Image: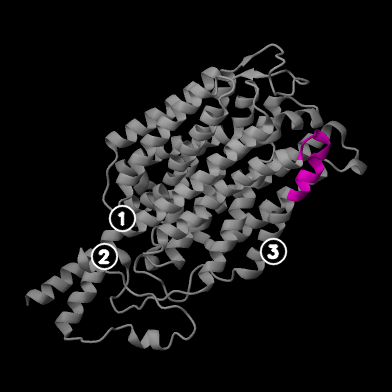
């Protein structure tokens, strides 16, 4: 009959989900604990990454090294993430979320503790103290890809479809929150170089806490019953097969290049902000507050856009508009930062740059999963991260190469005891140009179907037609909901039926 043929066609369309239409869905309260652990770990890792950037001049004085050597403490994150990023995608999609987060937590904690060895006076390390610091940073850098890739996997496995973008937003934006804390905390704790040991101890506390919570509190990769149709297929594609599919996906490659370039720009901006501003007389405290505004407004923008996209599903339109506006803000900052006494303009430009730029991050990660489905979430987001790190390394090295040494200036706020200050005029203009070029390319060429959403709509259509054909009058998940006890029930959203 026509109804039977419709059921068969809908079943073929939803075969990507790899499940029978009778499988019930269910959410668990402990998903919020998992989200909190990932957020804390992500935040701690970002704090460890950007520990020294807001006080680069004082770090150079304390360890008797150059500013370029201090920058390597941030740059090592990018370099290590390139090869290890591919390993992390395999770990996340093949071994599972639990072991990925736990391994990341232990690497992060170990690195933070080793960094403290560099300032222990009784060890009498001398010139070797910097290398303890560097080794600790390397271990923290190994932890970064594992936790950075986790939000989309966590959202897909533990959260229903109408909460995925919001959950991904919270987990992803905890990384910028760590940047915000580092920008404010480092200058506050280190008014002088002698306070650097205290700063290292303070940053170790959240790393140890996250490790304890991850080790003790995470017991499984996925919930016993999936929260959505696509959750049953979250790890269906083998790693190498998924990687080949991504490399043949034109829309995904455009997203990876443009969004990866945007992440690279934001990485350089966060790591070099203090050095860019101090040459024009802006203090470390102002640079830290500027970075804090950049991140706080970014968190607000990501929160608002995440809620909007969860309700409208306008992934593409939202990211294109925000990308263009963030490019305009980067141009304003690049110009204003080359003049003295422009504190208000710089603060406004940084706020808008963060508000529109950071808002793209969690939505673009969800968009990467949508346009690459059924490739695993770890693989689709991981490859973008690796691309962003490659572009970040190139940009960081290029920007430092384009700086020019300036003579001693009484109005400069830089610590001139080691090599003096640098003129960042050309690098900041180049940074704004790269951001603008990526925005234009993305707006012009990117477009894709929402493959995961379409697969879920087909699954719900199959369920509806099956019920109509079989004469079912009740909800097939009633028995499950009646026995779910204290756990939360996930009601179906209306969007698939409306579509």
Residue 212 image label: 3
**Residue closest to the eye, 234 or 148:** 148
Q: Which circle, 2 or 3, is nearer the viewer? A: 2
- Give the residue pinned by disc 2: 495
Residue 353, compared with residue 423, is above or below; it is below
Per the rendered image, the range of residues in magenta is 190-202
Q: Position of residue 109 (x, y in %)?
A: 70, 54
- Give the residue pinned by disc 1: 313
Residue 209, compared with residue 314, is above or below; it is below
Q: Position of residue 225 (x, y in %)?
A: 43, 76
Q: Are marks 2 and 1 in contact (CB under 8 Å)?
A: yes
Q: Outermost residue, top direction?
A: 407
Residue at 63% in and 64% down:
214
Q: Secondary structure at mark 1?
A: loop
Gap between marks 3 and 1 measured at Cα: 37 Å
Q: Position of residue 344 (x, y in %)?
A: 54, 31
């Amino acid at each position: 009959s026509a109804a039977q043929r419709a059921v068969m066609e809908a079943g073929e369309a939803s075969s990507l989900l790899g499940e029978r239409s009778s499988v019930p869905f269910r959410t668990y309260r402990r998903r919020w604990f998992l989200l909190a652990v990932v957020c804390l770990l992500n935040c701690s890792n970002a704090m460890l990454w950007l520990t020294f950037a807001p006080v680069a001049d004082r770090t150079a004085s304390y360890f008797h090294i150059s500013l370029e050597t201090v920058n390597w403490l941030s740059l090592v994150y990018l370099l290590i993430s390139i090869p290890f990023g591919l390993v992390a995608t395999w770990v996340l999609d093949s071994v599972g979320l639990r072991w990925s987060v736990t391994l990341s937590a232990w690497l992060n904690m170990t690195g933070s503790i080793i960094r403290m060895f560099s300032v222990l006076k009784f060890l009498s390390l001398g010139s070797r103290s910097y290398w303890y610091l560097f080794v600790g940073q390397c271990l923290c850098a190994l932890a970064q890809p594992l936790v950075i890739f986790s939000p989309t996997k966590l959202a897909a496995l533990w959260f229903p479809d109408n909460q995925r973008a919001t959950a991904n937003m919270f987990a992803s934006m905890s990384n910028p929150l760590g940047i915000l804390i580092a920008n404010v905390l480092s200058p506050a704790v280190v008014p002088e170089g002698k306070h650097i040991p205290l700063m290292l101890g303070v940053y170790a506390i959240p790393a140890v806490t996250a490790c304890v919570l991850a080790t003790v509190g995470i017991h499984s990769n996925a919930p016993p019953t999936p929260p959505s149709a696509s959750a049953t297929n979250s790890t269906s594609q083998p790693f190498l097969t998924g990687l080949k599919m991504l490399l043949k996906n034109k829309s995904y490659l455009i997203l990876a290049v443009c969004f990866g370039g945007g992440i690279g720009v934001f990485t350089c901006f966060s790591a070099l902000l203090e050095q860019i501003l101090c040459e024009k007389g802006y203090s470390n405290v102002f640079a830290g507050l500027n970075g804090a505004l950049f991140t706080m407004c970014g968190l607000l923008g990501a929160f608002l856009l995440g809620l909007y996209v969860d309700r409208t599903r306008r992934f593409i339109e939202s990211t294109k508009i925000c990308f263009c506006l963030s490019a305009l803000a980067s141009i304003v900052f690049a110009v204003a930062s080359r003049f003295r006494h422009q504190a208000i303009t710089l603060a406004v430009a940084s706020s808008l740059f963060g508000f529109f730029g950071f808002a793209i991050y969690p939505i673009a990660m969800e968009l990467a999963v949508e346009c690459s489905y059924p490739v695993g979430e770890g693989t689709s987001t991981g490859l973008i991260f690796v691309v962003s790190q490659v572009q970040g390394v190139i940009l960081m090295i290029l920007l430092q190469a384009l700086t020019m040494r300036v003579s001693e200036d009484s109005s400069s706020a830089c610590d001139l005891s080691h090599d003096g200050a640098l003129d960042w005029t050309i690098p900041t203009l180049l940074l704004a140009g790269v951001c603008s070029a990526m925005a234009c390319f993305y707006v012009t060429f990117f477009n894709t179907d929402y493959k995961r959403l379409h697969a879920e709509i087909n699954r719900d259509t199959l369920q509806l037609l099956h019920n109509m054909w079989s004469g079912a009058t009740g909800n097939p998940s009633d028995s499950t909901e009646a026995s779910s006890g204290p756990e939360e029930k996930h009601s179906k959203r209306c969007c698939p039926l409306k579509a």
